[in-house]
Every structure is written in C-alpha cells, then in structure tokens.
Amino acid sequence: MNKKIILFSIDGMRSDALKACGNPFVKELEKKCAYTYSAKSMNPSITLPCHFSMTHSVTPQRHGILTNTYIPQVRPVKGLFELIAENRGVNAFFYGWEPLRDIALPGALKFATYVNAYMQESGDTVLTNECIKLVREHKPDFVFLYQVETDEKGGHDNGFMSKPYLERISIAIDNVKRVMDEFSDEYSFILMADHGGHDRVHGTDMPEDMIIPIFFYGDDFIPGEINKSLSLLDIAPTIVKVLGILPDDHWEGSPVF
C-alpha cells in the first residue's frame, strides 16, 4: 500500500445536523479538509444498502440489497475489503450494529471488532477506544470505524434534529477527533454519513434522508469546499486510489482527486 486511510461512517448524520451540533471540531475540519455538505446517499436511504454502495461502488439496484436484511449478490461485485486484501493490504473493521458484518466477505478482514451499542450507554466511545488501541499496535492499511448511536439512540429514539440526536452527533465527532489527533501523521481520513433522516425514520428520497456530508483529510486532498457532485459511489474508488491500487472494473463511482 502507498498510504493508509481511516474511514469514519456516522450513521444517520444529516448535513444540517453536523453544522448544528455545536462541536467546535467541525469548524476545524472545514479548515483542514476538502468537504461537501451536499453529497448524495442512495435510494433506499437505509443503512445496509447504503453501506454496500459505499464499499462496492454500485447502486442498491445493482448489488441487490434493498433492506437491512443481507442477501447474497446475484451478480457479485467485488467489495472494497476484498480488493484491498487481494492486494496484500490489511483491513480492520469496527462496528456497533451487527448486520453490518456482511459488507465484508469472510477472509477479507484481518481484524474485526463488534461492540453491541444497545447494551451500554456509550458503545460508540467504547468501540473507538478499541480502534485506537488496535491501530496503535498493528497499523492496518485500511480502517473502517462505524458509529451507530447517532441513528438509533439519537434519530430513531428521539427524532432527527432533536437535542439528543445533536448531542449524539457531537459525541461521534469527539470520537473522530481523538482518532485524527493521534494518527494524522500516518493516515488519511474520510468522515461521512450513510444517510440522513426525518421525524424518527429514514429510507425515502426526501432531501432530509438523502443529503449527507463528506470530509476528506490528507496529502491527496486540497482543503476547501468541493464544488462537484459526490455520492456514496465515489468513496471506494477514492480509498483505493489513496492506497495505490486499481478499482474494480464494475465500480461506478469516481475518485475525488
């Protein structure tokens, strides 16, 4: 691998919510990162289909996963984890929602840590602690840290844009800051959401569900607001370009740089 990269996925984080959460690190991210507050999720704007599109660079209609229940792909597209592993890269995956395990095929992950976010008050913070410890020791090439409490304990339990939802986003950003502060000399970073939400739900093509923020940090990215249109499909191609490997021929997105 040419470089190393960490991907942060914060479940259900709306662009306007990130701006409104009050965490001062957001302004610092705007200064240091290439970013957009107008990227597009996928339709249906649901967690598992969106993460499949994020890591396989095809639409839900192409990979065939349209709900939060995994089904094997009828016409398989190689995913990000598999492509990195085939190129002798080391993957690490940290997640707090158990169905997300299926975005990586067996054998593609060197390290995988699951923390049940429903069983404790601060599962995302516990998971971030585990991520920091492992990255310190093993320095994997690609790290995927997923935080779920913004969506479940914030949006679904209390309503998207409610005070508890915004507080959960701020906690998630604090976790991102801890990782970036420790590893910014060694890693590039992508911070993003899979989808947004409205009322206590998501899954529609409403702007509240579909518009998401994405931030890119590292030597390959020029700080400032990105003017071109981006979507979840562009994430995997961007990551493999940072790592110095070729994308899969079936991928539909394009690298950001």
Image: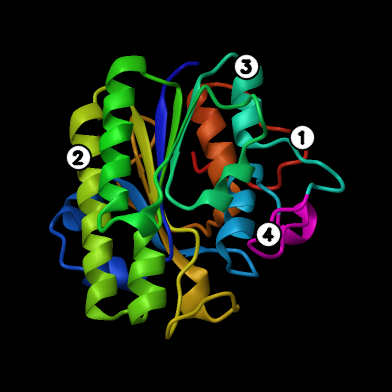
Q: Residue at x 54, y 81 (%)?
A: 206
**Label 3 packing within 10 angstroms: few (<14), some (14-19), many (20+):** few
> Could you tell which of marks 2 and 1 lies nearer the N-terminus?
2
Give, as a three-letter code, the residue at label 3.
Asn
Q: CA distance from mark 3 to mark 2?
A: 29 Å
Q: CA distance from mark 3 to mark 1?
A: 15 Å
Of 102 and 215, nearer the camera is 102
Does residue 254 appear anywhere in the picture? Answer: no
Q: Which mark is residue 249?
A: 1
Of the residues tagged 3 and 1, which is closer to the observer?
Answer: 3
- Range of magenta residues: 59-71
> Could you tell which of marks 3 and 2 lies nearer the N-terminus?
3
Residue 207 placement, left or right of 214: right
Of the residues tagged 3 and 4, which is closer to the observer?
Answer: 4
Label 2: which residue?
178
Element under disc 4: loop
Q: CA distance from mark 4 to mark 1?
A: 26 Å
Q: CA distance from mark 3 to mark 4?
A: 29 Å
Q: Residue at x 29, y 72 (%)?
A: 165
Q: Position of residue 38 (x, y in %)?
A: 44, 66
